[in-house]
Image: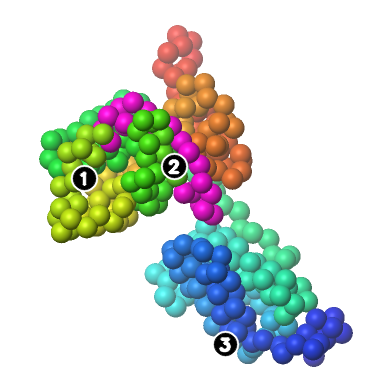
Amino acid sequence: MATEETERVTEGREVLTLREVKDEFLRSLRAADYSSHTLRAYRSDVGQFVAFLEDMGRRRLTDVTPEDVRLFLGHLADERPVGEARPCGRRSLLRKLSVIRRYFSFAVEGGTAPASPALGIRSPRLPKHLPRVLTQEQVAQLLSVGEDDSLLGRRDSAMFELIYSSGLRSKELLEANLNDLDLERCEIRVMGKARKVRVVPVGAPAAAALRRYLLEVRPQLVIRRSGTDCGRLFLSKNGLPLSASDLRRRMRLAVLASAAPADASPHTLRHSFATHLLEGGADLRSIQELLGHSSLSTTQVYTHVSATHLRETYRKAHPRA
């Protein structure tokens, strides 16, 4: 039965179904220019939640209780949901709960719900895993592997040098355009998460590898696409924008040919960039700006990595360690 508060909220307005609110919510995300990857994730998570509620007989937001949200999260954690390979881990549960909260917040702000039933739901605690970091020697060897004289080898060298030199995310590297790079000033303009723009420096070895790539390699890749230039900085062997799977595959080949850990990835180079800066004396706030982190707490994980490195150095070097 509708409460007095619910009646006040919905008075004079048609009460929307869960599915109708979901559609409005997704339209608002598209209008806000979210990436296609983010939109797919939100569509999947909200769709899964709405389908679960409908199976329980819920049709409108005003039917949903905090207990329904808890049951949904418990279902995800204990069983294999439709479309999922296994029960959800804590990181996936945290993401889905975040999406559910945004869905209800959208409804409350739009006047279609009196309050969010997800407000009092506690987030699952995540285990703290320190990021994988390469030593400076491992980075040097990995980057030297990409220096073979083949067309794609010279491209890979420029890519890996740039990731380590400037701390780019894979997505930032792949979406960088040719006109984002300024080799005269040795810097690159980066579109980060939430479409936040930052300008980061490009080191001398990376700049040299990029000049070589732009002069000797990229024009040949453009020709392979009938001379049509898509404008992206890094191109595939067919002159198309390089994909995430292309980047992972090329990184994997470089890792196999080096002494780097087998699970090293492009993001490992980004982690190594931050850790080596900290070990070299850079302050956390500057590293935060370079990485494009919105919160300093995200950057602080590198202090733990650096402390681990210092303890290991102490253990090996001190005569009475």
Q: Nearer the viewer, mark 3 or mark 1?
A: 1
Q: Position of residue 162 (x, y in %)?
A: 34, 37
The numbered dot on residue 189 is 2
State which region is magenta: 191-210
The numbered dot on residue 1 is none
The mark tally for this picture is 3
Magenta stretch contains residue 192: yes
Amino acid bearing label 3: Asp
**Residue to which mark 3 is pinned:** 55
Regarding residue 162, the answer to whether it shows in the image is yes
Q: Nearer the viewer, mark 2 or mark 3?
A: 2
Q: Position of residue 236 (x, y in %)?
A: 22, 53
**Residue to which mark 1 is pinned:** 218
**Quadrant into which the N terminus falls:** bottom right
Residues 292 and 220: in front is 220
Amino acid bearing label 2: Arg
Q: CA distance from mark 2 to mark 1?
A: 19 Å
Q: Position of residue 43 (x, y in %)?
A: 50, 73
Q: Quadrant of residue 120?
A: bottom right
Amino acid bearing label 1: Arg
